[in-house]
Amino acid sequence: MSKPVQRWALEWRSVNALDGERRHLIFENRIPALFTTRAAARDFAQKRWGYIKDRPDLRREPHCWRMPRPVRVTVCLSEPEREEGAA
């Protein structure tokens, strides 16, 4: 088992009448996009989704998108337990 580490991730946020509040971590190539600093996470969000700030049509219904927010996460790596008799 390894020592837990602190990283920064980006949280996608939207709140609309149809779906309600929706929040999830942003993934890149099927793995969570993790950053060592909050500034790096903010820069990535600005480059990738900065257009949301300038698009009133995306910020209101039916989308109600918001800029992704940097959030601190704790990453713990572990190996799955093996069943007895498994090769």
Image (tube, rainbow, N blue to C red):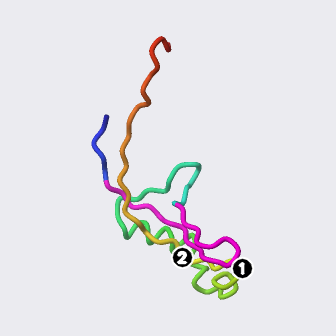
| Category of crowding for the residue at label 2, using alpha-carbon neighbours closer than 10 angstroms: few (below 14), some (14–19), many (at least 20) | many
What is the magenta range?
A: 6-24
Tell me if residue 75 comes above or below residue 62 in the rendering: above
Residue 49 magenta-highlighted? no
From the viewer's side, name the closer residue of 16 and 41: 16
Q: Which residue is mark 2?
A: 67
Q: Which corner quadrant holds the N terminus?
A: top left
Residue 8 magenta-highlighted? yes
- Which x, y percent locates residue 85? 48, 11
Seen at 52% across and 71% down, the residue is: 68
From the viewer's side, name the closer residue of 40 and 20: 20
Give the Cα distance between marks 2 and 1: 16 Å
- Which x, y percent locates residue 28? 56, 55
Q: Amino acid at mark 2?
A: Met
Q: Residue farthest to the left?
A: 3
Q: Which residue is mark 1?
A: 62
Seen at 37% across and 70% down, the residue is: 39
Seen at 37% across and 49% down, the residue is: 75
Q: Please state if 19 lies on the left or on the right of 3 as rendered.
A: right
- Tag count: 2
The part of the image, by quadrant, that contains residue 22 is bottom right
**Please, what secondary structure does the residue beneath circle 1 have?**
loop
Q: Please state if 18 lies on the left or on the right of 68 as rendered.
A: right
**Please, what secondary structure does the residue beneath circle 2 have?**
strand
Tell me if residue 62 comes above or below residue 87 in the rendering: below
From the viewer's side, name the closer residue of 43 and 22: 22
Principal secondary structure, stretch drawn in magenta: strand
| Category of crowding for the residue at label 1, using alpha-carbon neighbours closer than 10 angstroms: few (below 14), some (14–19), many (at least 20) | few
- Which x, y percent locates residue 40? 40, 66
Q: Amino acid at mark 1?
A: Pro
- Which x, y percent locates residue 26? 54, 60
